[in-house]
Amino acid sequence: MKGSCLCGAIEVTTQDHHEAGLCHCSMCRRWTGGPMFAVHCGSDVQFKGEAPAVYRSSEWAERGFCAKCGTHLFYHLLPANEYVLSLGLFQEQPFKLTDEIFIDEKPAYYEFRNETRKMTGQEVFDRFASGG
């Protein structure tokens, strides 16, 4: 999969993925203006062009964006070295929405009709803590 930020200064390359997820946590909603539409890509992610700007948003994660145009690039889970990339980077890739996390933080003003696996924030943390 190949994608890029809005201005084209950063190109992202990773293996093909077809399943996508949403994060409804308050940080993602503040960062993106809504839920974060994302694809889990593991550690096999390459960036070309400008280096992404990085904001350390917690003890365990950082968020990357283009310093020129502001495009949200990734959520990087540091302990696992896993990149969760923004779906908007990949305009030509067919995705299927399969998961929603932090469903307990989703505001009432929007609702998706897709059939998805849903996890609360506590379920996400429990799964991460157990390595599952």
Image: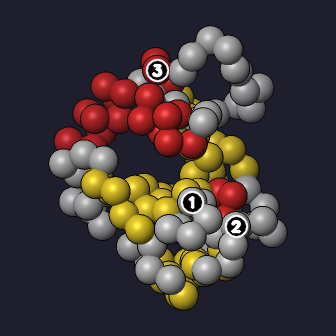
Image coordinates for residue 100, horizontal then vertical, percent: 55, 34
Task: Of the two numbered discs 3 and 1 on the same chain, state the one appearing first in sequence.
Answer: 1
What kind of residue is marked 3?
A: Glu
Determine the secondary structure under disc 1: loop
Q: Residue at x 70, y 21 (%)?
A: 111
Task: Of the two numbered discs 2 and 3 on the same chain, state the one appearing first in sequence.
Answer: 2
Q: Residue furthest bottom?
A: 49
Q: Name the residue under label 2.
A: 6
Q: Name the residue under label 1.
A: 70
Q: Residue at x 60, y 60 (%)?
A: 71
What kind of residue is marked 2?
A: Leu
| Measured Cα–Cα span from mark 3 to mark 1 | 25 Å
Q: Quadrant of residue 114?
A: top right
Task: Of the two numbered discs 1 and 2 on the same chain, state the one appearing first in sequence.
Answer: 2
Q: Which residue is drawn at 28% across and 54% down?
A: 56
Residue 71 relative to residue 84: left or right: right
* Count of marks, rendered view: 3
Please determine whether, in this image, residue 7 is positioned above or below residue 87: below
Q: Which residue is drawn at 25% across and 45% down?
A: 58
Determine the secondary structure under disc 3: helix
What kind of residue is marked 1?
A: Gly
Is mark 1 in CB contact (under 8 Å) with mark 2? yes
Image coordinates for residue 4, horizontal then vertical, percent: 66, 74
Q: Name the residue under label 3.
A: 105
